[in-house]
Image (cartoon, rainbow, N blue to C red):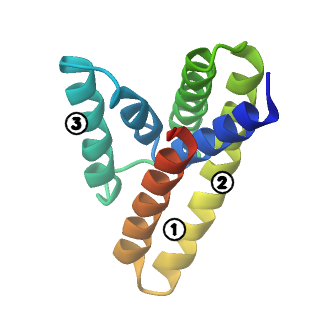
Amino acid sequence: MTDRVLLRSAVLGASAGARSMTPLARLALRKQGWIRIAAGAAALGEMAFDKSRKAPSRLRPAPLAGRVALGAVAGATFARRRGVGIAGPAIVAGLAAAGASYAGARWRAYAADHDFAIPGAVAEDAAAVALAWASSRD
C-alpha cells in the first residue's frame, strides 16, 4: 500500500466528518444508474437537512458512529479501486472522519456564536465537496 492511498483515504474520511455522504457520492460518480443517483440525492439531502434546527449534533453517538463508518467505507472503497488492501485505508479514513467531526462541530459553534451560522454551514459543505473531489480524482 502506498502512502498516497493512505493520505487520500484520510482526506476522504475528513470529508465524511463534515458531510457523511459526500465522499460516497463522489466515489459513486463512476457508477451508472440508480447508485449514482441515490448517493447524489443522499448527499444533497444531507446538506439541506444539516441547516435545519432539527439536525442532531454530529457528536452524539449515533451520528458520530455513522460518520466514522461511512468514512471507513469510503476509504476502503477507494483503496479497493487502487488494488491495495482495505484495512489500513479504512482505519485511517474512519479516524479522519472522527477528527473532522469534532473540528466541524467547533467550526459550526464558532460560526453560530458570531452570527454567520448558515454561511458557516455552506462553507463546510464546500470544504466537504472539495476534499472529496480532490482526494478521489485521478
Residue 10: quarter of image: top right
Q: Residue at x 66, y 39 (%)?
A: 8
Q: Name the side, left or right, on which 14 lies relative to 20.
A: right
Q: Earlier in the sequence, mark 2 or mark 3?
A: 3
Q: Which residue is mark 2?
A: 102
Q: Which is nearer the eye, 129 or 47?
A: 129
x%, y% of residue 134?
53, 50
Cα distance in 3D space between marks 3 and 1: 23 Å
- How many circles with numbers are drawn on the protein? 3
The reply to whether discs 3 and 1 touch (Cβ–Cβ < 8 Å) is no
Badge 3 crowding class, 10 Å Cα cut-off, few under 14, some 14 to 19, many 20 or more, is some
Q: Which residue is mark 3?
A: 41
Vertical position of residue 20 compared to residue 76: above or below: below
Q: Amino acid at mark 3?
A: Ala
- Please tell me the numbered disc located at residue 13: none
Vertical position of residue 126 compared to residue 34: above or below: below
Q: Earlier in the sequence, mark 3 or mark 1?
A: 3
Q: Residue at x 26, y 53 (%)?
A: 48
